[in-house]
Image (tube, rainbow, N blue to C red):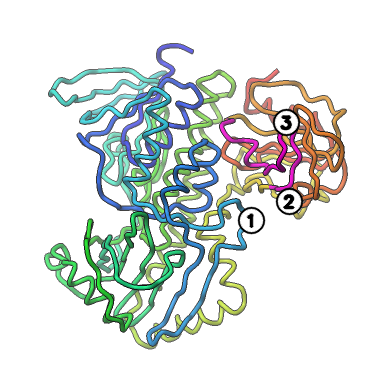
Amino acid sequence: MSNHDEVLIVGAGPVGLSAALALAKAKIPIRIIDRLAEPTNQSRAAILHVRTLEHFERLGVIDDFLATGVKIHGASIYAPGNVLLVHPSFDHLPTPYPFMLGLEQFKTEALLAQPLRAAGVEVERGVELLSFNDSGDRVSVRLKHPDGNETVEEFNYLLGADGAHSAVRTGLGLTLEGETLDATWITADVKIHWDRDPSEVVALLSEEGVAFIAAMNDERWRVIVTGPKWTQEKAEKTSLEDVQAIVNERFGTNISLYDPVWISAFGVNTRMAPAMSRGRVFLAGDAAHVHSPLGGQGMNTGIQDALNLTWKLALIIQGLAKLELLATYQAERHYNARRLLSRVGPATRMANLRSPVAIAVRNQVIHVLGHIGMSRVVPRVMSMLDVGYPESPLNSESHTSWLSRGPRSGERAPDAEQLLVAGKTDLQRLFSLWIGDDRHQLLVFGSTAMQIPASPLYAVTHILREGVPSAGVIVDTQGDAHEAYAVHKEGAIYLVRPDGIVAFRSSEADTAALSHYLGAWYKVG
């Protein structure tokens, strides 16, 4: 690994910090800079979804998040008059973390910065990216330091995680394309005198607009309301009294909001850059796409951008993968951003309806859908468990005739419980076996005789229905893993990527097909 095998990350919000932590844990030399002299103390994004929590488990940092945040298990969505429209619950989701986690953004940043510091990487504060040039074999950057000095430095790759006003995106000559919706939203982080259960989001869809209240850490609540038809100047001067009046009017209550730490009015943009990578330069998070706050998808999507990119960068820098692997970042995450915007934009317009007739129709539709399964579909979508890459060039399958129910390549690999593991007295979960391991996971069901060549690219785990566990062999005591992966005879293979996505699968012991797949993308053997 040469001196130039480094990544410069611009922006130390949750996206940049997640990228930095993943690369640091992979022993990749990196630097991370932020033009702000101090970390933000604003709440901003306040929800962590299931998929992000699963990533944090893999990174080995989940415990501190669970200890700090508030677990939100469901939502009650009302029409005016306290009419319950739908009551989605996260409890049924197939995950070790069946909830949203309410947590202020600056706390998320602090909890990511701590293990990053332990890995020997400090955020360089007050350092600004002025310009850069991608020469094809490395990226030259001009940086301005807190003392006013400017330096020119070289890196192998540059990642822009520097928000909606990204200097990296500007340097690429890209703009965020899309629309600004005709609505003003107001966010307030406050304490509330009331007896509501913090494990449940409360939302109201009325003629005046949307009101949404969710718990966060430190006994605070996130309040989001669509503002009245105010001028921009009035919206920017929104007071606690204004927010309280809106909430009480819409909910028909008389609750008291107090001790605000953040009140902000903002317009809603649904925009994305036409590309998320150019050569050796990449964009992630708000630098590449911005969203409505509806559903709390923005920060989570950005973190997942970062963790899609970093395992690929790490393997390239370690000399284990071919350069073509990096093109799949654009293919996968640009597709995902486009898919998200196609959902969130219309949903935001739907939430922001003002016509009494349109509102009545919308509320009736939501109520009916709630009775025919929407209560189960919505949590799966919001939790981001359905995020996948069905069209990714990285997907490959062989002999899948009887794997139709199992996770396809490009889909999230499921967890499994009740696993007997050598050296452990308690039964284990599959995901827990991968904590801190940034390799691919090669799951071989049934056969221990199958000859799989050793590789630094993957860890091999044989999963048996019965027997005695040993190194690289676990026992599926209740058949949970076989059921989750729809395996009904010996020899099935699943290759799971470091970001928890199935890369390759075969219902037979087709090691030739596996070798061919690996040879197309990786430098193995």
Q: CA distance from mark 2 to mark 3?
A: 24 Å
State the image quarter where residue 125 is shown. top left
Q: Which residues are magenta?
A: 416-437
Q: Secondary structure at mark 2?
A: helix
Q: Which residue is mark 1?
A: 94
Badge 1 or badge 3: first in the primary sequence: 1
Residue occupying image coordinates x 39% and y 19%: 138
Of 445 and 102, nearer the camera is 102
Kindly identify which residue carries mark 2.
Answer: 484
> Seen from this angle, which residue lies furthest top?
2
The alpha-carbon separation of the residues under discs 1 and 3 comes to: 26 Å
* Of the pair 141 and 207, the residue shown nearer to us: 207
Q: Is residue 69 magenta?
A: no
Q: Earlier in the sequence, mark 2 or mark 1?
A: 1
Which residue is outermost to the front? Answer: 425
Label ID, residue 233: none
Q: Which residue is mark 3?
A: 423
Residue at point 59%, 68% (across, down): 376
In the displayed structure, 514 sits above or below 410; it is above
User: Is residue 431 located in the magenta-colored stretch of the structure?
Assistant: yes
Classify residue 245 by image quadrant: bottom left
Residue type highlighted by circle 3: Gly
Image position, residue 203 (x, y; %):
40, 72
Q: Nearer the viewer, residue 64 or 358?
A: 64
Residue type at numbered disc 1: Pro
**Image position, residue 423 (x, y; %):** 72, 31
